Image (spheres, helix red, strand yellow):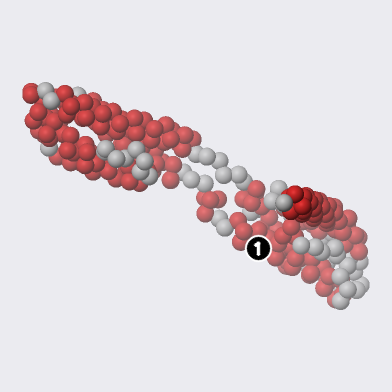
Amino acid sequence: MKKVILIFSFLKIRKQEFPEIINGAIAIVQKYNPKALFIDGMFNLLLELQTSLSVLTNKTVSHPLTKVLKTQRKRRLELISAIVWQGEAAEKAAVTSQAEAVSLVVPLINKHLSTLSRENLKVIHQEVQNFLWEFKLNDVMVSAATTIGVKLFIDELKALEDSMAVNITTRRESKSPNRSVNKVELRNNIIDAFSRLLNSIELAKVEHAELDYMPMINELNEFLVIYQALIRNRTTRSKTAAQKTTTVTSSTTTTATAAN
């Protein structure tokens, strides 16, 4: 059966053009009463998928809390550095009245915080949590931290960790449901439904020769040829650019060889 509807690779349609071609084709077919033309089955299938078109062009927007968390992570590293430096300073000062406090706090700092500056976020979070947990369990440790001047930094670190935990949970729970959609699969499903509609028109034209399908087909072809031309022009430009690159590379290589 000779095709009368213009068909090309719809996979080559760009993401921002895709809703235009589907919505445009639906509007054209709808004008001609799909039920009366015996193509309403495939038309309704495509119509159901039409509502999903916006998902394909939605841009993933950064959650407002992402910027907040970035600032908080920076501050966390600053606090970790301040605790480490203060511990080192107290150890170097070797003040007799602080000796016991230093012997309690500095080993804990070194155990969990001293090498975190280049670690990934998961390691930093876990080590900070471990540090705060061990610190909280020992009342003497709290007093010692006050003696060597790191208690305020540790308190802020604890408050910061609590705030970050809340922000991470809030961001996770408010993520757009569209992120879980497989856009490639959705696009392929819409293309498949669109192709089935066009094929059903071709078949119905043969089966129902008493009906005039050509006004709808002609309008569809006039609409589709615009996108076919876009694809051809882009393909031509890509080939021309590739040929120019090959020519320049070849010329450079030849010149270099001749020079040697």
Eyeballing the image, is 51 above or below 169? below
* Residue at left offset 21%, top offset 26%: 89
* Residue at left offset 25%, top offset 32%: 84
Q: Position of residue 119 (x, y in %)?
A: 35, 43
Eyeballing the image, is 86 above or below 113? above
Q: Position of residue 172 (x, y in %)?
A: 43, 45
Identify the element where label 1 is drawn: helix
Say what amino acid the circle numbered 1 marks: Asn
Eyeballing the image, is 152 above or below 23? above
Q: Which residue is mark 1?
A: 189
- Which corner quadrant of the image does residue 73 belong to? top left
Determine if residue 63 is in view: yes
Q: Is residue 11 left or right of residue 203?
A: left
Label 1: few (<14), some (14–19) or many (≥20) C-alpha neighbours in 10 Å: some
- Which corner quadrant of the image does residue 26 belong to? bottom right
Determine if residue 24 is in view: no
Q: Position of residue 145 (x, y in %)?
A: 16, 29
Eyeballing the image, is 139 above or below 42? above
User: What number of labels is visible?
Assistant: 1
The residue furthest front is 260
Q: Position of residue 18 (x, y in %)?
A: 72, 53
Q: Is residue 1 left or right of residue 66?
A: right
| Quarter of the picture holding the N terminus | bottom right
* Residue at left offset 42%, top offset 31%: 71
